[in-house]
Image: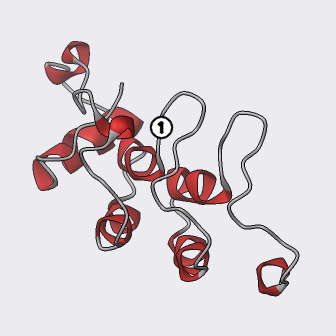
């Protein structure tokens, strides 16, 4: 596995500033999130160019287990710059039947009320 090699930097961002942890958290790959967090050089709260961090990326896509993993990790700030706005855009609050990412945000907002995310 590449992550086991010294010369591989698991925290290196792409041209948009997104790290492997941000991508895996947004996609809900909890096993890979755990592996990446096991590497000491991975910053669990590193924002991309738009300021999003792995925590809101996971929450916005409804990945509750990844959110719990990240919240249990030292260095993750649920009130940080990547989590500054309301988790649910007002236009979605009164939808009759939320689906996909909207449903995930509503569900996670109920379970993690102190975590705020950029829309």
Query: Quadrant of the rendered structure where residue 16 is?
Result: top right
User: x, y (%) of residue 12?
Assistant: 74, 56
User: x, y (%) of residue 9?
Assistant: 78, 67
Which residue does the numbered mark 1 point to in the structure image? 52
Foreground of the two, 10 or 111: 10
Residue that protrudes farthest toward the right in the picture: 7
Query: Would residue 33 appear left or right of 105 to someone viewing this image?
Result: right
Looking at the rendered structure, the secondary structure element under dot 1 is loop
The image shows residue 79, relative to residue 97, as above or below, that is below
The image shows residue 116, relative to residue 27, as above or below, that is above
Query: Would residue 55 appear left or right of 107 to someone viewing this image?
Result: right
Query: Would residue 118 appear left or right of 20 to someone viewing this image?
Result: left
User: x, y (%) of residue 7?
Assistant: 88, 76
Query: Quadrant of the rendered structure where residue 104 is?
Result: top left
Query: Would residue 8 appear left or right of 91 to someone viewing this image?
Result: right
Foreground of the two, 71 or 63: 71
Foreground of the two, 21 or 13: 13
In what quadrant of the picture does the N terminus appear? bottom right
At 47% across and 51% down in the image, what residue appears?
54
The image shows residue 67, relative to residue 94, as above or below, that is below
At 14% across and 55% down in the image, what residue appears?
111
User: x, y (%) of residue 116?
Assistant: 23, 38
At 54% across and 27% down in the image, what residue appears?
50
Q: Using a 10 Å C-alpha cutoff, classify the residue at mark 1 as few (fewer than 14 neighbours), some (14 to 19) or many (20 or more).
A: many
At 67% across and 58% down in the image, what residue appears?
20
In what quadrant of the picture does the C terminus appear? top left
């Amino acid at each position: 596995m590449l992550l086991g090699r010294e010369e591989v930097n698991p925290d290196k961002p792409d041209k948009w500033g997104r790290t492997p942890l941000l991508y895996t958290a947004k996609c809900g790959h909890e096993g890979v999130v755990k592996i990446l967090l096991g590497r000491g050089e991975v910053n669990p709260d590193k924002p991309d160019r738009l300021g999003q961090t792995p925590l809101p990326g996971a929450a916005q896509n409804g990945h509750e287990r990844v959110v719990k993993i990240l919240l249990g990790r030292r260095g993750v700030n649920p009130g940080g710059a990547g989590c500054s706005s309301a988790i649910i855009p007002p236009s979605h609050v009164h939808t009759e039947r939320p689906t996909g990412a909207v449903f995930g945000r509503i569900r996670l907002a109920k379970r993690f009320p102190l975590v705020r995310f950029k829309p």
